[in-house]
Image: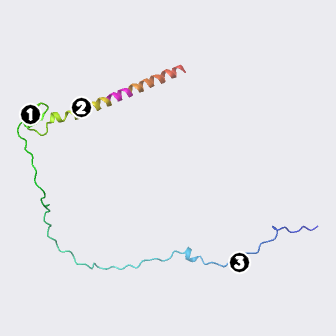
């Protein structure tokens, strides 16, 4: 007998397609900007006199400090110096020395640790 056509055997109707003009999308438009050369419209600036030097107004009352001989105490000595270098520098020098020694000790400990590690590795390789 004759085989009955199945639903997939029936051809689909051709879709109706209208032709579409793609030229506006495929051809670059001519977008030239019109330019025109024009001379400046403002007058040239005249030379300006130099500005006077700015001085701010005085405000308040001027203060002053006078140190009489032997008025200040540094340790157990009287002095007229507001800043005694050899006394003021002591904490700075102390910290610099402490930090330098601390850094040196850290570097020595690290070097010792590295040499111990290297010795251990060499002994371990020999045992294998």
Q: Going by the image, does 110 lie left or right of 93?
A: right
Residue 107 is situated, as x and y percent measured from the top left of the image, at: 35, 29
x and y percentages locating residue 62 in the rendered image = 10, 53
Range of residues picked out in magenta: 104-110
- Residue closer to the observer: 115 or 64: 64
The picture places residue 48, in percent across and down from the top left corner, at 16, 71
Residue at x-position 9% and y-position 46%: 65
Mark 2 or mark 1: whose residue is earlier in sequence: 1
Q: Main secondary structure of the magenta part?
A: helix
* 3D distance between C-alphas at marks 2 and 1: 25 Å
Most extreme residue toward the left is 69
Q: Residue at x 24, y 31 (%)?
A: 94
Give the alpha-carbon distance from disc 3 to disc 1, as whole Å: 113 Å
Viewer-nearest of labels 2 and 1? Answer: 1
Q: Earlier in the sequence, mark 3 or mark 1?
A: 3
Q: Which mark is residue 16?
A: 3
Q: Nearer the viewer, residue 82 or 32?
A: 82
Question: Residue 87 lies in magenta, yes or no?
Answer: no
Quadrant in the rendering for residue 82: top left
> What residue would you read off at disc 1?
78
Label 2, secondary structure: give it. Answer: helix
Front one among 32 and 62: 62
Real-space CA distance between mark 3 and mark 2, rounded to the nearest whole angstrom? 96 Å
């Amino acid at each position: 007998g004759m085989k009955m056509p199945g639903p997939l055997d029936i051809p689909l109707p051709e879709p109706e397609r209208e032709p579409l003009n793609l030229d506006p999308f495929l051809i670059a438009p001519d977008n030239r900007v019109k330019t025109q050369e024009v001379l400046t419209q403002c007058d040239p600036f005249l030379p300006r006199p130099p500005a006077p030097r700015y001085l701010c107004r005085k405000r308040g009352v001027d203060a002053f400090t006078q140190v009489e001989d032997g008025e200040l105490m540094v340790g157990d000595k009287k002095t007229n110096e507001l800043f005694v270098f050899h006394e003021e520098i002591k904490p700075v020098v102390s910290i610099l020395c402490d930090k330098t020694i601390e850094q040196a000790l850290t570097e020595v400990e690290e070097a010792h640790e590295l040499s111990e590690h290297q010795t251990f590795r060499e002994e371990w390789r020999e045992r294998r």
